[in-house]
Image: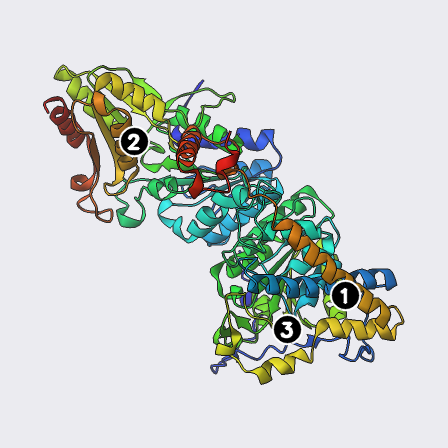
Amino acid sequence: MNTDVYKESPVVHQPAFIDGHSVEIPILKVLQQDGTVYEGAELPEIDQESATKIYKTLAFHRVLDERMVASQRQGRLSFYMTALGEEAASVGGAAGLKPQDMIMAQYREQGALMYRGFSLENFMNQMFSNEKDLGKGRQMPIHYGSRELNYMTISSPLATQIPQATGYAYGQKLQGLDAVTICYFGEGAASEGDFHAGLNMAAVHRAPVIFFCRNNGYAISTPADEQYAGNGIASRGVGYGIKTIRIDGNDILAVLKATQDARTYALAENKPVLIEAMSYRLGAHSTSDDPSGYRTREEEAKWQAHDPILRMKNWMLANKWWDEAQETTLFDKLREEVLAAVKVAEKIDKPPVEDLITDVYDEPPTLLKAQLAELKVHIKKYPEAYPFTAGRIK
Amino acid sequence: MAQMNLLHAINNALDIAMTENERAVCFGEDVGHFGGVFRATSGLQEKFGKLRCFNTPLVEQGVIGFANGLAAQGSVPIAEIQFADYIFPAFDQIVNESAKFRYRSGNEFDVGNLTIRTPYGGGIAGGLYHSQSPEAYFAHTPGLKVVVPRNPYQAKGLLLASIRDKNPVIFFEPKRLYRASVGEVPLEDYQLPLGKAEIVTPGSDITLLAWGAQMEIIEKAAEMAAADGISCEIIDLRTILPWDIETVVNSVTKTGRLVVSQEAPLTAGFASEIAATIQKECFLHLESPIARICGMDTPYPLSLEKEYVADHLKVYEAIKHSINY
C-alpha cells in the first residue's frame, strides 16, 4: 500500500491551503524571432542536413495549407484544416523522434506526417477521398494515417488517442522495443476524460509515451481561459507524477530539444513525459469556421509576429545554411507541385461500391454481403442517381 | 474433462490464452493480485507476472482506451469491465474507436486482437446497477462482435475463440451462473465457433430462442410445455453480432412459431431485431405472431425483481399462447 505520501507530508496544525497556482512552470525558449539563439541556451542535436529537412518540411506545410484552403474556397475540396502558426510543434516533434516511434495525433499535426515522408499524392488522395486513398475514402479530409510511416490514422473524436497512446507505448515496452509513442492533443481536448485516463494510466503503469499538448489558445471559438483555470496543462502533469516541461511551441529548436530529451528519458526510465507547447492557432479552426466572430485582428497580428517558420528561416540564414534564392525556388516549386497534384487527385475515381462493406470486420459477414448484393441491384435500376458507381458494378 | 463452474472455465481459458501467446495481457479493476471481484482472473498474476496481469486505475474509458492502443500495437489485450453496468464510460472508446478502427483506416490499423470481458445480467439481487444486459447497444454497432455463453463448456470454447478472433469482441458473462452453472469441461484447448447458433434440443412444434443465462429459463419452460405434449426446438444464439440468421430461419420454417426471450427490456432489444428478420424471412411459414418475452421497460428493479424478470412461467404462457393462436 502506498502511504508514503502521508509519511512525507510535513505536519501542520493550522489550516494551510495550497494555492492552485503555486507551482511555477518555466518556459523553455532557445531561439529568438530574429534567428539568434538565447545566450546560454542548450541546442538540440541538429546539423545543416537535418535542419534543412525540417525547414523544407515547414515550407511544404505552409504551402499545402495555403493551397488547400484556396481549393476549398473554389469548391474543389469539401473541408480543410490548417496548422498556420503552429507548424513547429508537429514538425519539430517528429524530427525529435526515430522513424520507429508511433505518432498518435489529434488532427492538426499533418506536419509530423510530412516529416515522415508521406507523399504529396498520398495527402491529395486522402483529401479528395478517391480510390487511391489509403483510408479508402472513408474519412473527411485531413484524417491521414500510414502504417508504413507509423502514423496512426486520425479519428475525429477528441482525446480518444490519449489512453490509446498509453496502451500502444505499454505494448512497445512489453516487447522491449527501441520505440516510444508520441501523442498530440490540444488544450481543449485535455478537458476530456480520456486525457485524465491516459496520463494517469501511463504514470501508474510506466508507459514510454510523450504527451505533447499544443496549447494554441483556442478550441474552435472557446479561448483557453474558458477551458481551464489552472496553470495551463503542464501543471496537471505534476499532479499525475509525470515529468513535465513547458516550451515555446513556435521555437523549433525548443520543440526539438524537448522532444529529443523526452524520448531519451521515456525509453531509459519507461516513464511518460508531458510537453506543453505554447502557441497560437493563427488560422481558423477549419474551413467551416470564421474567427472574426470571436477574436480581434490585433490579437492575431500580435501572434503573426511570432511566426515559427520565419523564425527558423532567420536562424538558417544566420547560419548560412539557407539563402533567399533557395527560398524563392523552394516555395515556387512547392506551389507548382501542389497545384498539379490537386488537378490529378480530383480526377481519380471514387472507391468502388464494394469498399462499402470491407474492413468493417476482417471478413464481411453474410448479412453484409446480402446487403451489398441488394444495393447493387438497386443501383443498376437507378444508375443516373449513383453516377460514381453505377458504371463500374460487375 | 473436469467439473468446472463458469468462473473456472473462464479462468482456464485465460490461462490457456496467456500461455500460448506471450503477447496476451489481462487487466481491469481489481484484476491483478486479487483476481477480480468474481475471481475470474485468479492466479494469473502469480503465473504470468505483473506486467501481463494487472490492476488498472478505476477508469473504464481508460481501460478500453488503453486496450485499443495495445491491440493496435499488436498485443492481445483481454480487458475486464467489472460489471456491464459500468461499461458506459467506455462507450465512446468501444463504439467510436474499437468498432471503427479497421474501417476508418482502410485496414492500415486494426484492434482485432481486443477482447472485452464483462459480467452481465440479473438474478443476484443487484438492483439497477449490477443487473443490466446491455448487449443491444453494442449489437447496433457494426465492427463489433458480441458473444454470450450459457454454461462452462460454452464459456471456455467461446472465450478462446473470441480472444483469437481478428475482430474486437465483447464477451458478456452471465454472472448469475458464475458459480451456479457447473459442468464437464475439457482441460485441453478447444474453440467453439463465433457467429453460429446452436440447436440445444431439437423439436417440432415451436422454436424457443435465447442466449446466456436466459437459456436456463427457456429450457425450464420447454420442460413444462413438454408435459403438455408440446415439442420445443431450443436454440442458443451464442453470438448476438453478427448473428446466425440461417439456423433460426431454418428452425422457424420447420416449426412455424417463435418465442424469443431476453433479460433486457423489451423495447429495441435484440429480440426485436430477431423478430423483424424472422417475420421477413419466414412470413409464409408463420402460424402465429413472434413473441418477445423480455424484461419490462423499466430500470432493473430490486425488491420486485421476481415480478419484473422474463421467467419460465412467462415463457411457458407465451408458448401456449403461440400454440393456441
Q: Of tags 3 and 1, which is closer to the observer?
A: 1
Locate residue A349, reporting x and y percent.
58, 43
Q: Label 1, on which residue?
A: A331
**The numbered mark 3 sits on a residue in which chain?**
A
Locate residue A64, reporting x and y percent.
67, 61
* Residue under the image location 73 percent in, 53 percent down: A116
Disc 2 residue type (three-letter): Thr
Which label sits on residue A279? 3
Q: Label 2, on which residue?
A: B277
Disc 3 residue type (three-letter): Ser
* Residue under the image location 35 percent in, 26 percent down: B245
Which structural element holds mark 3?
loop
**The numbered mark 2 sits on a residue in which chain?**
B
Which structural element holds mark 1?
helix
Discs 1 and 2 carry the same chain letter: no
Locate residue A83, reporting x and y percent.
63, 66
